[in-house]
Image: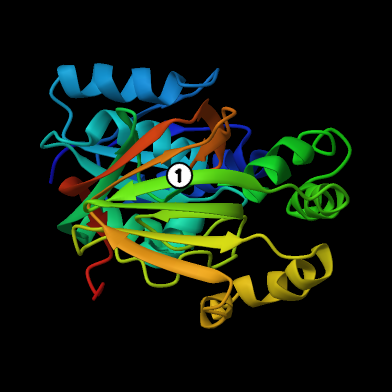
Amino acid sequence: MDKPYFIVNPVSGSGLAAQKFKEVSKLLEAKGVDFSFDYTAAPRHATALAKAAIERGKRLIAAVGGDGTVNEVAAATIGTDAVLAVLPFGTGNDFTKVMGFAKDVEGAADTILNGTVKNADAAEVNGRPFINVAGLGFDVAVLKATEKFKNKYNGMLPYMLGIIDTLSHLKTMPLTIEHDGVTEKCDSIIMSVGNGQYIGGGMRAVPMADPFDGMLDICYVERVSILKFICLLPKFIKGKHIKHKDIVHHIRTAEIKVSCPEACALQLDGEVDMTTPAVFRALPGALKVLLPADAK
């Protein structure tokens, strides 16, 4: 087994990630596993740590935290022979829901010891990698609104308050969508581009996405009234919104370009990062992941 290197976000999950990592460490030490670790100290620090580790010859790199931490570490491992392990001890852990990473301390330790390596897909937008879901519109507005509540509340409450705040001034985006020789125009409330399926700590925004099929799945909701969108939101939790084909649309493609007359902000794996125009591309098999031995 390659000597594991852990990159730990000490503030992820309100400190839960660091606490659970200590528990995992004790289990690995009891098994005589030699490993090393570092704590992140700033945004994008995890990417820098992972790149430096790969240059030193590390080949098993574990991200300890939530989706943001996993995204940063994966940004360094995508397209290399380094294997990404995930200890999903953050708040949302949306990528874990589709990948099947072990969520408990014992399971995480067992994956490090006995896990199996698989080649999963990744994706990129304007050259910047992501592994789960990128999007624009409503989810970006929610993420921005959520920041106002993070200093007062922990867990998922800031996100829920962000949803309520955003609904009070719901906006649409006039989008031009280009893929597979087709050009479409629409007024959309939210667009999600999925390698994975979940956003916001459990909303199944792109239920048809499969991170092992080499394709991207895109789901977008066209302009509707605030009341109709509020009624649609609960259906996102189990991915049932996709049944409303009159207002919810699905595209499966390897590459798609999205533009808007005014630049629209994008989120990548829950981090607001750039603006349109945006070219999204699938990166088939570009991400080596360590999964539990019994993973399907």
Colour scheme in use: rainbow
Identity of the residue drawn at 54% across and 70% down: 248
Total tally of numbered discs in the picture = 1
Q: Is residue 61 above or below residue 180?
A: above
| 10 sits to left or right of 180 | right
Indicate the position of residue 107 as horizontal and vertical percent values.
39, 64
Residue at image coords 23%, 58%: 215
The residue that label 1 is drawn on is 176
Q: Quadrant of residue 75?
A: top left
Asked if residue 179 is positioned above or below residue 224 in the image, the reply reads above
Residue 66 seen anywhere in this rendered image of the structure: no
Q: Determine whether, in the image, residue 159 is placed left or right of residue 63.
A: right
Question: Is 44 drawn above or below residue 14 in the view shown?
Answer: above
**Looking at the picture, how far across and down is residue 196, in whole percent?**
39, 59
Q: What secondary structure is marked by label 1?
A: strand
**Amino acid on which the number 1 mark rests in the picture:** Thr
| x, y percent for residue 205 | 53, 64
**Foreground pick, 149 / 162:** 162
Asked if residue 169 can be seen in this view, the reply is yes
Quarter of the image for the C terminus: give it.
bottom left
Q: Position of residue 292 (x, y in %)?
A: 28, 65
Relative depth, front residue between 270 and 18: 270
Question: Quadrant location of residue 265?
Answer: top right
Q: What residue lies at 66% left-to-right and 60% top-to-bottom?
A: 223
Label 1 crowding class (10 Å Cα cut-off): few <14, some 14-19, many 20+? some
Q: Nearer the viewer, residue 57 or 228?
A: 228
